[in-house]
Amino acid sequence: MKELWSDPAWLAGAHAWIDEQTASLGLVRAGEVEQPHLETWSTVLKVPTTTGPVWFKANHGPLEHEAALVTLLTERVPDLVQALLAVDLDRGWMLMSDGGERLRELIEVEQSLERWHHALDAVARISLALEDDVDHLLALGVPDLRLATLPAGYAALMDEIDAEPRFREAAAQVADLSARLAPYGIRDSVQHDDLHDGQIYVRDGRHWVLDWGDACVSHPFFVLSVALEGQLAWGLDDEESSVDTAPFRDTFLAPYAAAYPHLSHADLAEAVRLATRLGWAVRAVNGHIAGDKDQTVTRLTMFVDGGV
């Protein structure tokens, strides 16, 4: 898709749509459109205006549902997800206001991880708010990685990448962890599935979680695999297991403790322990891109070697 995103004819069409939308919004262009993000799965264009930049995003086919998903999210939780300035649902195009400063840069400046609490609280409340929308989410094309469907998805991935025996043998662990997690009764919902410090933005004191292209329908606690183990545990100095992630886990769990009062803190913590391991299998299945086996193997290694 990189060739398409950089094709002059495609860019001309995208620019024309951007100009049409910005004009209808009363925004005045203040310079040339830039293309700071160009990947196989998506591209992002930066559009300078006299009142600040706005951003255009297009996804490749498997992720085109992001535009419809973000539209739904802003209807359900408008205080937690930024509304789009414009959207083309047929093409999966989005025009977005500026999110502000990325958490990644703020952490460097502030030398603190405390802002993560805002993001973890937000994603928990988002998942809780969309528990009744599972059928709608699936109809939009959001991938189905619920506990009941995950084992089959994992098996299909093993064949697609011709996985080595130890990963294939871990299919039994996928089934076992799914069976152990299900009795806690946490309902499936939307799950961001790639929550890292490059996806969280701060503007005017508000913390926003962006980039829902990798979202899936699954157990909501799977979001903690990347957030806790992939990010927070490494701390400010990129040193593995240098941070106690329990306080961040508990921030995420607080809305669930209120929504599921029959579950004790110990129950919720154990569900997180199981889900954080199994979530790496979900990330491998959901995030696999044909031709990019290395990243998938890294996620499978996190699943198999992390241990429960």
Image (spheres, helix red, strand yellow):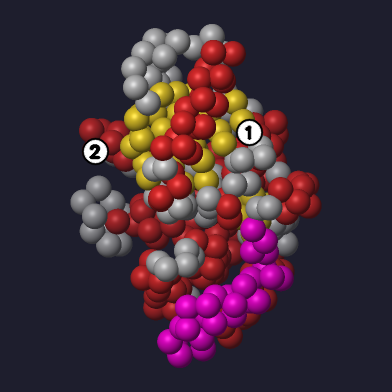
Q: Position of residue 131 (x, y in %)?
A: 73, 48
Whether residue 286 is visible to the viewer of this picture, yes or no, is yes
Q: Name which residue lies at 45% across and 90% down.
A: 165
The one nearer the camera, 259 or 229, is 229
Residue 166's tag is none
Q: Position of residue 85 (x, y in %)?
A: 57, 23
Tell me which segment is drawn in magenta. Answer: 143-170
Instruction: Specify the quadrant of the image occupied by residue 25.
Output: top right
Question: In this picture, is 117 found above or below 56?
Answer: below
- Using a 10 Å C-alpha cutoff, classify the residue at mark 2 as few (fewer than 14 neighbours), some (14 to 19) or many (20 or more): few
Amino acid type at circle 1 is Asp
Q: Is residue 178 left or right of residue 23?
A: right
Q: Earlier in the sequence, mark 1 or mark 2?
A: 1
Question: In this picture, is 251 found above or below 110?
Answer: below
Q: Name which residue lies at 41% across and 37% down.
A: 8
The one nearer the camera, 268 or 220, is 220
Q: Position of residue 284 (x, y in %)?
A: 49, 68
The residue tagged 1 is: 88
The residue tagged 2 is: 108
Q: Nearer the viewer, mark 1 or mark 2?
A: 1
Q: Position of residue 83 (x, y in %)?
A: 59, 27
Residue 164 lies within the magenta run: yes
Q: Name which residue lies at 72% across and 62% down.
A: 185
Question: In this picture, is 22 found above or below 104?
Answer: above
Residue 80 lies within the magenta run: no
Q: Is residue 13 left or right of residue 40?
A: right
Amino acid type at circle 2 is Glu
Q: Name which residue lies at 50% across and 32% down.
A: 14
Real-space Cα separation, disc 1 to disc 2, in angstroms: 36 Å
